[in-house]
Amino acid sequence: MLPLVVLNGPTASGKSSLAVALAVELIGRQRPAEIINADSMLVYRGMDIGTAKPSLPERGGVAHHLIDILRVDQTATVADFQQLARQAIAECRNRGVIPILVGGSALYVHAILDEFEFPGTDPALRARLERDLDQAGAEEMHRRLAQASPGAAADILPGNGRRIVRALEVIELTGRYQATLPTWHYALPDVRQWGLTLERSELDLRIEHRVELMWQQGLVEEVRGLEQRGLREGRTASRALGYRQLLQHFDGELTMGQAKEQTITRTRRFARKQLGWFRRDPRITWLEASDPGNARLIADAV
């Protein structure tokens, strides 16, 4: 069985470029490799600048899976992503290709790799809760969640309306919400995980530079174009960092400067939360993100 290589780390830590470098290194050793995306926002067509989606030249000729597979008005659930990613991993292995899973979302990675079952859903209940979210806002819904399940509320950021709605739905359906994730127990064979880490000050600086570059590259125009293609109807896509702030700017709720600054501060907060999630997994071997030898080191180990 070919190994499943997993690269974890917060946003702006260099996962995408390392994944390409690793795949190229493995291919150079006559070991075919392809990349599988585990970032919940890279699945959307047209969301390129604000997600730092690797361009075709940046992909270095390496095949990438689960990128640009949905319209912005469609919703990507963790359960759907689990199924799609596991299918892609199995298909790579069946062709004699080493799959490299690049994890932007710790929850998605955990769901893909481990024994992870999902409670059912009720479309009518979900629709009602989403209407409540639209009317009351994420912070008010978070207060409602805190009354129903303090543990769940503590585990979900007040601005994450999608997860708040899902938690409230599960509580109404099952009477409880499991705030803690399942234990670390792989559902897939021969998983080998690495993580990228760097000083907080360096990460903060990278995020600020990345957001500034997004604005320079035309994020405002990208969001305006996606708005015409149903971005506001997309329950997941419309809440992506940068996209949500610019939609608020278009609505007159934020100035352009506030939209940019809020994108920076909330991305930094998200990155810290990502790193906190990944740090909980004792199976990850951590590497300094700035080390140029990481691709060779990982290739030697697999």
Image (cartoon, rainbow, N blue to C red):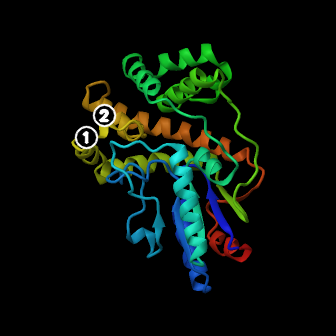
Residue 40 screen position, x and y as percent? 48, 48
Residue wearing tag 1: 227
Residue 179: x and y in percent read 68, 30
Sequence-wise, the earlier of marks 1 and 2 is 1
Q: Is residue 41 left or right of residue 151?
A: left
Left or right, 52 with reference to 9: left
Kindly identify the residue that appears in the image at 53 percent across and 30 percent down. Answer: 166
- State the image coordinates of residue 19 (x, y, percent, origin top left): 56, 66
- Image coordinates for residue 42, horizontal then vertical, percent: 43, 53
Answer with left or right where residue 212 lies relative to residue 2. left
The reply to whether residue 35 is visible in this rendering is yes
120 relative to 302 in the view: left or right: left
How far, Cα to Cα, is label 1 from label 2? 8 Å
Q: Is residue 59 above or below residue 30?
A: above
Q: Secondary structure at mark 1?
A: helix
Q: Are marks 1 and 2 in contact (CB under 8 Å)?
A: yes
Residue at image position (58%, 27%) is: 170
Q: Nearer the viewer, residue 173 or 203?
A: 173
Mark 1 residue type: Glu
Whether residue 14 is visible here, answered yes or no, is no
Which sits in the foreground, 122 or 237? 122
